[in-house]
Image (cartoon, rainbow, N blue to C red):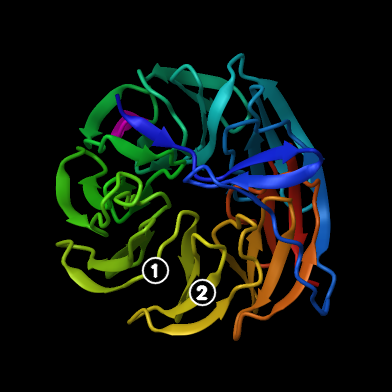
Amino acid sequence: MKKLIYILLLVSVSGCASIHNLFGTKTTIPKLPQIHQAFKPLILWDDDVGSADDAVFVPAVDGGAVFAASRGGKLYRFESLKGRKIWQIKTGHKLSAGVGVGEGLVVVCSEDGEVLAYDESGKAMWNYHVLGELLSVPEIADGVVVVRVGDGRIFGLDEKTGKQLWVYQHANPALAIRSYAGVVISQGMVYAGFAGGKLVSVDLQTGAVNWETTVARAHGTTELERIADVTSLPIVDELQVCAIAYQGRLACFDIAKGDLIWSTDVSSYAGMIVDKRNFFVSSDQGDVLSLDSTSGASAWKQSELEGREITAPYVQDSYVVVGDIQGYVHFMRRSDGELVARTDTDGSPIRFQPVRLNSDMFLVQTKKGHLYAMAVP
């Protein structure tokens, strides 16, 4: 049987927060680093959408609307600037992933393999049943809803009817990290990273493979040492697609042929973001790295958040932002990585990187189910 590894699990022992890492070692979460608070981050609105439990839910933004979901099966729509609740519905399912938004559809996934589609007024449109575990956010583009199954399959569904258009199957190795990463759609292609360090490009309309390449190769002697999985979303621009692997490297490939352009040794489970000049990466250890986007050369490294199970970074104005396992949101100066501000939420883990709301605001959703709209003053 294939085995899934849970990388970092939050547990509570005698009132002390601890982490079980990949190798089963329990370590105490480090104390918050002391910083000079340069500004107070603004929480512009917040609401309770329900616990995520053991799933990872990501809010979605479409125009002036924010959509969010919970493990208990509720789906919400909010007005983006003030946080006014426009509607909420009960899906009747225990949900496992979401929310995907696009082309007038709002899509979530249930733990029993149902892909559930609604229009933006909350009216049920269709559902499609997949035999398998749905853990990642659906993506919608050009008439196709793309969902990913934990066993390595990717489905393309017709956005109007939910009918299956195609399925892509990738074989996972015997030992793999449990991943919540979905897919990225760009220029008519679907990009996805897999266990075993693979990255694939498939056609959005047909599911035909354009190319497959290797981000990182396995090293070491034991099964655990040889894990080199891509567990976060790739990053795509007009010329290249880049991905990063756990116990592997960051590598960028030609978008048309999949040929390697450059790579650098860095390991990440959470993932990365890029601007015009730099990649910002959350490493396995909890360091935040700034790397040149054309060569991978290091610009700076912020190590004071090590062991706090930080999210992938988000860029807001002059700052790089991450969430952590205790619900803190940390702000680093974009130019040199210095920690300059932080704010707390509800004390529960933030498990996915902040989501852009508009040019001035971003969203975070906690494990307990609180949704926050934040900004830099």
Q: Is residue 233 left or right of residue 108?
A: left
The residue wearing badge 2 is 289
Residue at image coords 81%, 46%: 346
Residue segment shown in magenta: 149-158
Q: Considering depth in this image, is 246 or 96 the residue closer to the camera?
A: 246
Q: Give the amino acid type for the residue marked by disc 2 in the picture.
A: Leu
Query: Tag 2's secondary structure?
Result: strand
CA separation in Å, label 2 and label 1: 9 Å
Residue 285 in the image: above or below residue 373: below
Q: Give the amino acid type for the residue marked by disc 1 in the picture.
A: Val
Quadrant in which the C terminus is drawn: bottom right
The residue wearing badge 1 is 266
Residue 283 visible, this angle = yes
Which badge, 2 or 1, is on the more N-terminal residue? Answer: 1
**Is residue 181 shown in magenta?**
no
Q: Quadrant of residue 334?
A: bottom right
Q: Is residue 23 left or right of residue 79?
A: left
Residue 367 in the image: above or below residue 295: above
Prevailing SS of the magenta stretch? strand
Residue at image coords 40%, 34%: 4
Q: Which mark is residue 368?
A: none
Tell me where residue 189 appears, x and y as whole percent.
27, 50
Q: Quadrant of residue 68?
A: top right
Tell me where residue 358 appears, x and y as whole percent.
64, 61
| Circles 2, 1 touching at the beta carbon (< 8 Å) | yes
Tell me where residue 59 appears, x and y as whole percent.
62, 44
Count residues near mark 1 (Cα–Cα under 10 Å), then give few for <14, some for 14-19, many for 20+.
Answer: some
Residue at image coords 44%, 78%: 291
Query: Tag 1's secondary structure?
Result: loop
Residue 159 in the image: above or below residue 8: above
Tell me where residue 34 appears, x and y as whole percent.
80, 73
